[in-house]
């Protein structure tokens, strides 16, 4: 009898604007049949073009706190004034079904996941430089100047935590950065399945 396939939990972090969403999307496009992206819950307002249930489940702070109290999150954290959390049951059921899961979460959440599930694989996406990150974040035009300042301040302390991750990838070139993440994904999923 063939052994049940094992899903691997990948935690990908990086400061806002570093391009982690784009890199993860490529992984999803290539390995969509055996990888799932976990949709988090957040109290932040949807950005233009974002859809409830696709990028996030957009919920009130009251609802968020209720879910925390019910222990519904695998991890949760406050980031730049908003709360974010990973739905526990959904992630665990995917892994049990042999589907690998990508969590695109902040540093505080990543540390919680590593403590609870040490077999998870953590990857930090770094910008080529802080100036480049600032440039990208301002150019994106999705946040007010005040919110950008908050995100830049958060980015500085996040980047300091990069060494705590299993892998660090510098996103100076999208294809090269993706090639590295792809390599890690293949190696770790093959390893988990002997
Ligand atoms: P954004 O508001 O730009 O979508 O996300 C802000 C930060 O929150 C990013 O670093 C993102 O990866 C992180 N984030 C998104 N979902 C979660 C989550 O469920 N848990 C935690 N801890 N961070 C999250």
Image (cartoon, rainbow, N blue to C red):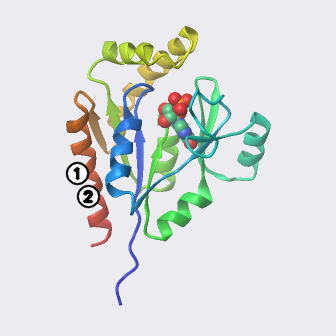
Direction top: furthest residue: 145
Dot 2, crowdedness within 10 Å: few (<14), some or many (≥20)? few
The residue at the point 77 percent across, 42 percent down is: 63
The residue at the point 38 percent across, 74 percent down is: 5
The residue at the point 40 percent across, 78 percent down is: 4
Number of dots carrying numbers: 2
At mark 1, the secondary structure is helix
Task: Give percent across and percent down for residue 172.
Answer: 23, 27
Residue 1 falls in image quadrant: bottom left
Tag of residue 101: none
Gap in Å between the C-alphas at discs 1 and 2? 5 Å
Q: Which residue is mark 2?
A: 186
Task: Give percent across and percent down for residue 142.
Answer: 52, 20
Task: Give percent across and percent down for residue 66.
Answer: 78, 45
Left or right position of 85 against 65:
left
Dot 1, crowdedness within 10 Å: few (<14), some or many (≥20)? few
Tag of residue 183: 1
**Ligand 1 has an atom within 8 Å of the beta carbon of the residue at disc 1:** no
The residue at the point 51 percent across, 11 percent down is: 149
Task: Give percent across and percent down for residue 128.
Answer: 26, 22
Identify whether 151 is placed above or below 71. Answer: above
Which is nearer the eye, 27 or 133? 27
Q: Is disc 1 in contact with disc 2, using a CB cutoff of under 8 Å?
A: yes
Which is nearer the eye, 30 or 11? 30
Which is nearer the eye, 165 or 44? 44
Residue 125 falls in image quadrant: top left
| Quarter of the picture holding the C terminus | bottom left
């Amino acid at each position: 009898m063939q052994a049940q396939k094992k899903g691997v939990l990948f935690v990908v972090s990086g400061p806002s604007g570093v391009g982690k969403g784009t890199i993860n999307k490529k992984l999803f496009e290539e390995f969509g049949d055996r990888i799932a992206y976990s949709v988090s819950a957040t109290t932040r307002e949807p950005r233009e073009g974002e859809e409830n249930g696709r990028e996030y489940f957009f919920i009130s702070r009251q609802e968020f706190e209720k879910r925390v109290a019910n222990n519904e999150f695998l991890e949760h954290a406050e980031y730049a004034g908003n709360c974010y959390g990973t739905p526990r049951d959904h992630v665990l059921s995917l892994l049990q079904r042999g589907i690998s899961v990508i969590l695109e979460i902040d540093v505080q959440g990543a540390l919680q996941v590593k403590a609870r599930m040490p077999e998870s694989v953590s990857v930090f996406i770094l910008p080529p430089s802080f100036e480049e990150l600032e440039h990208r974040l301002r150019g994106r035009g999705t946040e007010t100047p005040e919110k950008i300042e908050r995100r830049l301040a958060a980015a500085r302390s996040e980047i300091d935590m990069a060494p705590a991750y299993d892998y660090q990838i510098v996103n100076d070139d999208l294809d090269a950065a993706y090639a590295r993440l792809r390599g890690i994904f293949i190696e770790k999923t093959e390893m988990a399945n002997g």
